[in-house]
Image (cartoon, rainbow, N blue to C red):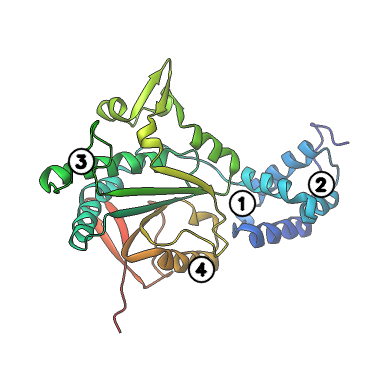
Amino acid sequence: MATSSVQIQVTEAELKLLQTLIYQECGMYFDERRAHFLQDRLQRRLKACGLDTFYSYYRVLTSHQGRPELALLVENLTVNETSFFRNKPQLDLFHRTILEELLHRKQDRRDWSLRFWSAGCSTGQEPYTMAMLIADALAYYYLRNPLPFEMPSPKPLIPPPWKVEILASDINYSVLRTAQEAVYPDDQMEPVDYAYRLRYFDKAGDRYNVKQSLKQLVHFDFHNLKTEFLPQRNDVIFCRNVMIYFDEAEQKRLVEKFYRCLNPEGYLFIGHAESLFGLSDRFRMVHVNNGTAYQRIEVHS
C-alpha cells in the first residue's frame, strides 16, 4: 500500500501516456509547463486509491470499471476559480447592449424564447449572475415596451410571454452539486450589490440562498466539451477561462462547435485573456467600454 509520505516515481513516458489519455477523454492538454501540476494531482489520486505504481493506476483508468476514477482525476485537474459578477465590463456589455439588442430582435419576430448556456459553470456563480442580469434587463425592457399580456399576480420574475432557459454545464460532478444547492457563504457575496442580494437571495445566518424563482431559470447538467452532443439553439454562450486548458487544435474544434450551437447572430463570451484571433474567422468582435464578445457571422448564399 502507498503511504502518504512516499512519492511514487512516475517516468516521463508514463506521464505522456496519462497526458494522451486525458486529451482523448476531455480535450485538456498538459504541456511541459503544466507537467508538474499533472504529476502532483496524479500522486494525490494514487494515494487515494492505495496504489503504489503508475502502471496499476493506469490499468484502473483504462478498465471499464475505472470510469468513475477517470472522472475523479479530471475533476482534480480543473481549477474551479469563479465568482459572482466576474469581469464587470464584459457583463455590462452583456446586460446593457447585447440583451437589449437581442430582446428587440426577438420581439420583432414574435419569438419570446431566450436560451443561454454557461459552459464550464463551476460552482454556479456565473449562471446565477447571468440569470440576475437577464431578469433585470427584461424588467427594464418591459417597462419601456409593455406588451398586451395580462401580468399575473404575484408578478413573476420573467414577464410573459417571455420564456428564459439557462443551461449550465461542467465536467466536474462535485461543483455541479454545489451549484445546484445554490447556497453561498458571506465571503463569496462581496461582488453582489445590496439591491441584488435583497431581490435574488434569502439570507440565513452567514449564508445566502439563491431564491427559488431565480434558481428555477437555471438547469445544471454534466457535459464534456470534447463530445458532439452539446446544447443547441443558444442565443448567448458563456465559456470563460475554459479554452486555456486546450491546445490550439482542440480550441479550433471547440469554437467551431460553439458556432453550430448558436442561433443566427448569437453571441459568444470567452475569458478576458482568451481570444478567437487565429482560431476562427466566423465571428466578429464586439467591443464596448473594455468589454468584449464575439457575434456569429451569417453567411448568406
Q: Is residue 16 left or right of residue 136?
A: right
- Mark 3 and mark 4 in contact (Cβ < 8 Å)? no
Q: Is residue 88 visible?
A: yes
Q: Residue at x 45, y 27 (%)?
A: 184
Point out the tag, 1 or 4, that comes first from the N-terminus: 1
Looking at the rendered structure, the number of numbered marks drawn on it comes to: 4
* Residue indicated by mark 2: 9
Closer-to-camera residue (154/239)? 154
How far apart, in angstroms, are the residues tagged by discs 1 and 4?
Answer: 22 Å
Q: Is residue 201 left or right of residue 32?
A: left
Which mark, residue 34?
Answer: 1
How far apart, in angstroms, are the residues tagged by discs 1 and 2?
Answer: 17 Å
* Residue 69 place in picture, x, y as percent: 73, 46
Which mark, residue 253?
Answer: 4
Q: Is residue 31 visible?
A: no
How far apart, in angstroms, are the residues tagged by discs 4 and 3?
Answer: 37 Å
Count residues near mark 2 (Cα–Cα under 10 Å), then give few for <14, some for 14-19, many for 20+.
Answer: few
How far apart, in angstroms, are the residues tagged by discs 1 and 3?
Answer: 46 Å
* Residue 46 place in picture, x, y as percent: 78, 42
Image height of 287 relative to 154, above or below: below
